[in-house]
Image: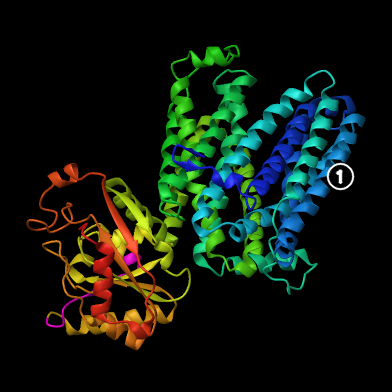
């Protein structure tokens, strides 16, 4: 099934469908219980005369987050040591028992028991997180990670929304505590039945020795989470997103009441719009990324989070403080409502673009034997950032800022944090520029890209058609690629940043700069010995007539020095574009940007050629056959 270009076919596969149902129902039950408890807290607190509702609400939030600090390290160890499907089934059995205790707490009006249940639910979530994101890479292919994560994020926010709405409705009905109690137990049982259908996911570190010292293990997990800079900074990005989202969502009820003078149904409307935006953005990642882990979407998402949060602040109306609360119909009739809803939907949509590639990147680039523990480290940092978001909001509001002004601060902070993260890991910004250039000017189709190995060194060889050949290959290749390119192309404005960040290797003819060519061969050897991918254009120059030039012997020298497999590639459809030399100098006919806008191009890969069989002539014949007659 495809909706808006997004495939839902994974839901029908046993390696994903039962897991999706299980995690959806778990998130639904969490929020069904929490919302029911929030509604009841006021009445229980007043009747028991134990504490104020505000204090209890904050205590409840702390009790739910605390287990992530206490148990995430242990959860990560167990998820790496055990079969993840078996661990999920045990967690779901525990959920059934916890929900039975919740029912007893509701029936007895026991606030201490209900708060204990909340802590137990947080503990269950802390143990489920590392299994949840650690299992996906075991059951999904790499090209399914983005759609799989997108569906999970969409399902999670849909479950949060539905659980919140239903919890608020059921608990206020006559016999509400009975309805909520029955629903909690029923959903937990169905979730356990779904977990029984999840296929086995064998342990990735079966020989790991379990450490009972959670403080020592937490510190150890955070330390090796930092060992991979890209993964760690991706985790910081994920944690920042939860800081951003928690701050925004925590203020929405106050914003609706004090700044919009609206009733509770309007808050539900805004929450619905936010959840639908996140879900839509998460699903659209598959279409926008071509099913690859496209981290170029992360800066795109960050821009949207800043721009639309800032406009949300600007769109806030100035209303009299004594206005009466309005319902949904009256709110929608106001001139400012459409802009507020648009801003909220767009910032949440861009939030999906931001978060899904980061989760997929952490899963893809984490060592398989440490993946669940790294995700546990992610959960610890997420919880810490959410606590910090609450403290910041409390401090700024106590200092006299209004809720809209807090949104302004959040937008400015997001801009600053994004710049900081993209400065630490320029690969994000580099991939964004590549994604923007290629996916706005062309319609890129990729064939047989799986011939490029997922790990280990190799050399890519490709025909040279235009000044953006390297960008097209970089947009299609799942792994970072080091390009050997003519020094004049390397020096081009704007894209020079992409090439420098991407570790490209400038090269010049021996007659122009003999030292540069020797340095280039040395760097190629260094990259290959480090297990990386190097791409060269053996023709040495861009074609002027669409026909391939003779492949030079440099590829033979490279493989002789460092024997690695060579993957032939062919670019098709780029000749005649703005960046090609058809009919004269490249980029001299701006009209072609219009006449060839969104034209189709294709990148085709052949099976790898062993180092012992590599020859310039043989590779040229293979690339020519791949290219065919489409230039």
User: Which span of residues is magenta-colored?
Assistant: 500-511
Q: Nearer the viewer, residue 360 or 559?
A: 559
Q: Nearer the viewer, residue 544 or 525?
A: 544
Residue at the spot 49% in from the left edge and 56% down from the top edge: 143
Residue farthest to the bottom, as pictured: 561
Q: Nearer the viewer, residue 125 or 2?
A: 2
Q: Where is residue 159, by image quadrant?
A: top right
**Is residue 509 rendered magenta in the image?**
yes
Horizontal side, residue 246 vs residue 64: left or right: left
**Is residue 587 rendered magenta in the image?**
no
Disc 1 target residue: 97
Percent of width and height locating residue 108 = 92, 31
Give SS at disc 1.
Answer: helix
Q: Is residue 479 visible?
A: no
Percent of width and height locating residue 460 = 33, 71
Percent of width and height locating residue 163 = 69, 33
Residue at the spot 52% in from the left edge and 48% down from the top edge: 147
Q: Is residue 476 visible?
A: yes
Q: Where, quadrant-wise, is the C terminus in this rendering?
A: bottom left
Residue farthest to the right, as pictured: 108
**Is residue 271 depicted above or below 427 in this figure?**
above
Residue at the spot 80% in from the left edge and 27% down from the top edge: 40
């Amino acid at each position: 099934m495809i909706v808006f270009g997004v495939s839902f076919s994974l839901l029908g596969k046993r390696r994903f469908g039962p897991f999706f149902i299980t995690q959806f129902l778990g998130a639904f039950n969490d929020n069904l219980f929490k919302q029911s408890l929030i509604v009841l807290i006021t009445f229980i607190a007043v009747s028991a005369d134990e504490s104020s509702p505000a204090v209890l609400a904050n205590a409840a939030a702390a009790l739910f987050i605390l287990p992530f600090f206490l148990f995430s390290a242990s959860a990560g160890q167990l998820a790496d040591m055990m079969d993840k499907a078996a661990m999920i089934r045990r967690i779901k059995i525990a959920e059934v028992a916890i929900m039975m205790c919740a029912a007893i707490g509701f029936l007895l009006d026991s606030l201490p028991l209900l708060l204990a249940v909340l802590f137990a639910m947080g503990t269950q979530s802390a143990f489920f997180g590392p299994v949840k994101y650690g299992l996906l890479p075991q059951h999904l292919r790499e090209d399914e990670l983005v759609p799989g994560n997108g569906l999970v994020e969409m399902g999670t926010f849909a479950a949060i929304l539905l659980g919140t709405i239903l919890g608020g409705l059921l608990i206020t009905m006559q016999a509400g505590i009975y309805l909520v109690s029955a629903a909690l137990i029923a959903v937990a049982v169905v979730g356990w039945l779904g977990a029984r259908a999840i296929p086995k996911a064998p342990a990735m570190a079966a020989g790991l020795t379990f450490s009972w010292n959670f403080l020592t293990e937490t510190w150890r997990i955070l330390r090796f989470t930092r060992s991979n800079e890209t993964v760690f900074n991706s985790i910081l990005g994920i944690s920042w997103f939860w800081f951003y989202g928690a701050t925004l969502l925590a203020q929405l009820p106050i914003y609706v009441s004090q700044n919009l003078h609206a009733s509770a149904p309007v808050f539900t409307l805004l929450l619905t719009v936010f959840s639908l935006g996140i879900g839509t953005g998460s699903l659209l990642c598959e279409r926008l990324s071509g099913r690859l882990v496209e981290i170029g979407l992360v800066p795109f998402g960050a821009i949207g989070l800043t721009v639309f949060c800032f406009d949300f602040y600007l769109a806030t109306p100035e209303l009299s403080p004594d206005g009466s609360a309005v319902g949904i119909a009256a709110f929608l009739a106001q001139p400012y409502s459409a802009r507020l809803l648009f801003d909220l939907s767009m910032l949440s949509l861009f939030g999906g673009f931001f978060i899904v590639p980061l989760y997929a990147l952490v899963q893809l680039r984490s060592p398989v034997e440490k993946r669940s523990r790294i995700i546990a480290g992610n959960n610890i940092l997420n919880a810490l950032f959410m606590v910090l978001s609450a403290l910041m909001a409390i401090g700024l509001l106590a200092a006299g800022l209004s809720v809209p002004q807090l949104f302004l601060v959040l937008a400015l902070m997001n801009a600053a944090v994004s710049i900081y993260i993209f400065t630490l890991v320029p690969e994000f910004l580099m991939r964004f520029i590549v994604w923007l250039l290629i996916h706005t000017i062309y319609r890129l189709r990729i064939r047989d890209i799986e011939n490029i190995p997922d790990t280990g060194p190799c050399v890519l060889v490709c025909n040279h058609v235009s000044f953006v050949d390297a960008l097209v290959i970089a947009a299609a290749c799942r792994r970072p690629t080091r390009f050997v390119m003519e020094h004049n192309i390397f020096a081009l404005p704007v894209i020079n940043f992409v090439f420098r960040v991407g570790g490209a290797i400038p090269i010049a003819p021996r007659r122009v700069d003999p030292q540069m060519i020797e340095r280039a061969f040395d760097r190629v050897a260094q990259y290959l010995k480090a297990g990386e991918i190097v791409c060269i254009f053996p023709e040495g120059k861009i074609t002027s007539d669409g026909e391939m030039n003779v492949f030079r012997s440099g590829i033979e020298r490279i493989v002789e020095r460092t024997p690695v497999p060579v993957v032939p590639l062919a670019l098709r459809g780029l000749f005649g574009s703005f960046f090609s030399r058809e009919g004269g100098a490249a980029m001299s006919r701006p009209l072609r940007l219009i006449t060839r806008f969104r034209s189709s191009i294709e990148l085709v890969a052949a099976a790898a050629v062993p180092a012992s069989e590599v020859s310039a002539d043989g590779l040229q014949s293979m690339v020519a056959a791949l290219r065919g007659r489409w230039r």
